[in-house]
Amino acid sequence: MLPGTERINRLREYEFFAVAGHDQMEKPIWTHDFANMQPLLKWNDRVGPATVTYGTPLRRYLMCVTHGPWPGQGAHDTCFLISEHLGPWKL
């Protein structure tokens, strides 16, 4: 089912990365409990705008992270990460 405006505004429709992070097989643990939501990546004072997409031909998740003045102009650092299960991430 495609997301519609009636579904996209319902918190119970979302899943969040759980406190525990990953199971023993390094697969992410998900929860519907917003209070248990955790970041997919921590990089203190470095993570700015970030996007994640699934590359079907690679069967991997790809993350692009940018750090720099936001909003604004100036030098930015960009890093590309890859993961089989939304973490752990590799450069």
Image: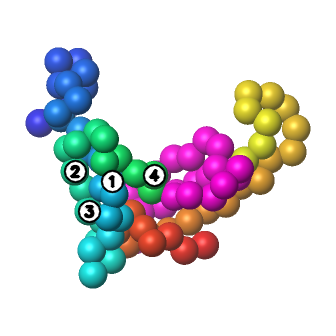
50 in the magenta segment: yes
Q: Are marks 4 and 1 in contact (CB under 8 Å)?
A: yes
How many other residues sit within 10 Å of disc 4, few (<14), some (14-19) or many (≥20)? few
- Image quadrant for the N terminus? top left
Instruction: Say the numbered circle drawn on residue 44.
Output: none
Q: Are marks 1 and 2 in contact (CB under 8 Å)?
A: yes
Farthest top residue?
6
User: Which segment is the magenta one?
Assistant: 41-66
The kind of secondary structure element at disc 3 is strand
Please name the amino acid that badge 3 sits on. Answer: Ile
Which of marks 2 and 4 precedes in the sequence? 2
* Residue 75 point in image, percent of width and height: 86, 45
Q: Which residue is mark 3?
A: 29
Q: Are marks 3 and 1 in contact (CB under 8 Å)?
A: yes
Instruction: State whether residue 24 is above or below residue 13.
Output: below
Please name the amino acid that badge 4 sits on. Answer: Pro
Q: Which residue is mark 2?
A: 31
Label 3 – label 1 distance at C-alpha: 6 Å
Q: Are marks 4 and 2 in contact (CB under 8 Å)?
A: no
* Residue 36 point in image, percent of width and height: 31, 48
Q: Which residue is mark 1?
A: 17
Please name the amino acid that badge 1 sits on. Answer: Phe
Label 1 – label 2 distance at C-alpha: 6 Å
Front residue of 45 and 88: 45
Instruction: State whether residue 82 is above or below residue 69.
Output: below
